[in-house]
């Protein structure tokens, strides 16, 4: 399709903030917008020039805010709409862009649309959600709820019980109560979503991370109809805001970037996919097979077999976004040493596409095991704990009494914090800064630059790739590896030890190097 992508994405590096846990400014134990605003210079100092904020809208918080009650109102616990506009302004003054989180697939059951929709008397919101016309057989193939409203039918869920599915229609009609994507109800839902986006874009937001973007049209096996809905929504918004950008939670770049015209698509942690084989393949039989686990027999070809065809097919449509982690997945540090994390970030930040760094991953923040579920977090809760700014009270996150904190600080692992890593030139924090500085200084390393594989083999952990004039090599194993003879150049950046021999450059155990090719 070759649509022109917003130019600013070419050199963008995103930082994801879970607002609950970043910085509390008023001592109530929960993060807030003024706290995040005060920390913008820190984020900038990392080399991140864009931010994605998890939902911070009015909500009963049964799914951490992914159950929206009012799309246009900041949740009072985080501040006011004016605070958010000020956050946009300060970010822009620092040359940064800001994404909000758009949840188009469902609302909270407390959203006024849903309350109207559940009424027996037909009204303007009757078709905003998916309702059957009879209770007994429910809604085939989908979870549904009955017995809650006066309306004569049951309604479909999109995720938790508190999240009824918005109605974008069905690609295949099996029952008379199902509507087509072009019917008036589903068309009105689309317009409502456009209206929400316009509202925030007009106040300075630069785009959206789109939650469960593939979930809109039901019984849509090939996602063609869902893609058409997005073409319509994004097409309308781009006419008014040509620099706005959109990243999908989809993890199918052909469907998302080509079919639905998103600018970026997350490469999510789906068991067995290419991303998973790099840092998260520890649940398969026979133990840990992650490529970056030292001496786990790492095989980069498993990543390449999945990634390269997707990259080749979509590289003229948009970007595949690698992430260090997110609010839904155990932190990378859970299974990996600091060096393993450093090496994996070196790869993720030097591949094509627009990378996303999850708050705290730049420090190697721990995943807190066995925390009781908080706001629908379940096992995700351990990745949502307070940002560790210092070794002081509550890790510098909040002035509140420790028992009042949204989630506890990990008292055992406070060595990992901004203050202490800041002063250590080889800390993970400063490694991240150096890697991102390298990426910003070399056009070839940015989103759209070429990628060539120089050396990759199933039985050898050494991986060598080329981005334009830069050759990069990674050795996750505990043994030295010699670079293939033809890879020569001056070292721009390195992790670990290297030495030069007659036969070529030798990469020490667990090392990475970026060379300007000769
Ligand atoms: C996405 C979000 C997740 C949320 C779910 C339902 O997967 O990332 O946190 O619970 O959608 O909105
Ligand atoms: Ca607060």
Image (cartoon, rainbow, N blue to C red):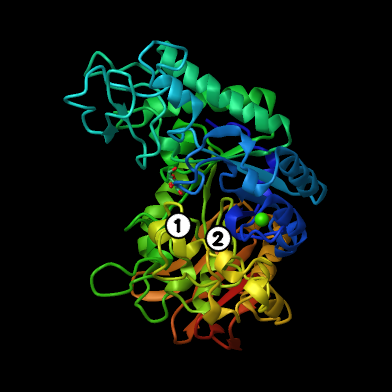
Residue 97: x %, y % from top left: 71, 45
Q: Is residue 224 above or below residue 349?
A: above
Question: Is residue 72 visible to us here?
Answer: yes
Kindly indicate whether the residue at mark 1 contacts the one at mark 2 (C-beta within 8 angstroms). yes
Ligand 2 near label 2 (Cβ, under 8 Å)? no
Instruction: Return the x and y of residue 361 as percentages of the image width and height.
Output: 56, 66
- In the picture, the disc for residue 384 is none
Front-most of 218 and 129?
A: 129
In the visual, does 145 lie left or right of 49?
left
- Report the residue at 47% width, 68% height from top: 332
- Report the disc number at residue 374: 1
Query: Which quadrant does the C terminus fall into?
Result: bottom right
Q: Quadrant of residue 192?
A: top right
Distance, label 2 to label 1, CA atoms, is 9 Å
Q: Mark number for residue 406?
A: 2
Quarter of the image where one finds residue 70: top right
Relative to 180, residue 26 above or below? below
């Amino acid at each position: 399709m070759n649509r022109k992508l917003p130019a600013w994405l070419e050199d963008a590096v995103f930082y994801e903030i879970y607002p609950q846990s970043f910085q509390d400014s008023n001592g109530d134990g929960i993060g807030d917008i003024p706290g995040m605003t005060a920390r913008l210079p820190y984020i900038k100092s990392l080399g991140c020039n864009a931010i994605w904020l998890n939902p911070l809208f009015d909500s009963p918080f049964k799914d951490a805010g992914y159950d929206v009650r009012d799309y246009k109102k900041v949740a009072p616990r985080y501040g006011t709409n004016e605070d958010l506009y000020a956050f946009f302004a300060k970010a822009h003054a620092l040359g940064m862009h800001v994404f909000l989180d758009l949840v188009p697939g469902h609302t909270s059951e407390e959203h006024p649309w849903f309350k109207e929709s559940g009424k027996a008397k037909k009204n303007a919101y009757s078709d905003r959600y998916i309702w059957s016309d009879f209770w007994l057989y429910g809604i085939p193939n989908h979870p549904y709820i009955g017995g809650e409203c006066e309306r004569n039918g049951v309604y479909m869920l999109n995720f938790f019980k508190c999240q009824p599915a918005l109605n974008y229609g069905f690609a295949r009609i099996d029952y008379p109560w199902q509507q087509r994507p072009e019917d008036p109800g589903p068309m009105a839902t689309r317009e409502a979503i456009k209206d929400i986006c316009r509202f925030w874009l007009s106040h300075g937001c630069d785009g959206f991370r789109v939650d469960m973007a593939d979930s809109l049209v039901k019984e849509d096996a090939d996602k063609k109809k869902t893609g058409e809905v997005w073409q319509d929504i994004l097409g309308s918004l781009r006419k008014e805001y040509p620099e706005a950008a959109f990243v999908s939670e989809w993890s199918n770049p052909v469907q998302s970037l080509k079919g639905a015209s998103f600018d970026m698509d997350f490469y999510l942690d789906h068991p067995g996919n290419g991303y998973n084989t790099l840092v998260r393949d520890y649940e398969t039989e026979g133990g840990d097979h992650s490529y970056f686990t030292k001496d786990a027999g790492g095989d980069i070809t498993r990543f390449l077999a999945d990634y390269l065809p997707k990259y080749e097919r979509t590289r003229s449509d948009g970007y595949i976004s690698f992430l260090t982690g997110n609010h839904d997945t155990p932190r990378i540090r859970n299974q990996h040493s600091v060096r393993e994390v450093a090496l994996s970030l070196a790869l993720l930040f030097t591949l094509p596409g627009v990378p996303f760094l999850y708050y705290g991953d730049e420090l190697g923040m721990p995943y807190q095991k066995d925390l009781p579920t908080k706001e629908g977090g379940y096992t995700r809760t351990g990745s949502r704990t307070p940002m560790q700014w210092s070794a002081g009270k509550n890790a510098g996150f909040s002035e509140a009494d420790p028992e009042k904190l949204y989630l506890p600080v990990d008292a055992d692992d406070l060595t990992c914090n901004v203050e202490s890593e800041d002063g250590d030139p080889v800390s993970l924090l400063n490694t991240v800064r150096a890697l991102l500085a390298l990426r910003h200084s070399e056009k070839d390393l940015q989103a759209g630059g070429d990628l060539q594989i120089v050396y990759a083999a199933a039985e050898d952990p050494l991986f060598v790739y080329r981005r334009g004039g830069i050759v990069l090599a990674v050795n996750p194993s505990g043994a030295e590896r010699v670079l293939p003879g033809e890879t020569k150049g001056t070292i721009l950046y390195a992790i670990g030890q290297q030495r030069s021999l007659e036969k070529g450059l030798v990469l020490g155990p667990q090392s990475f190097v970026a060379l300007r090719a000769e």
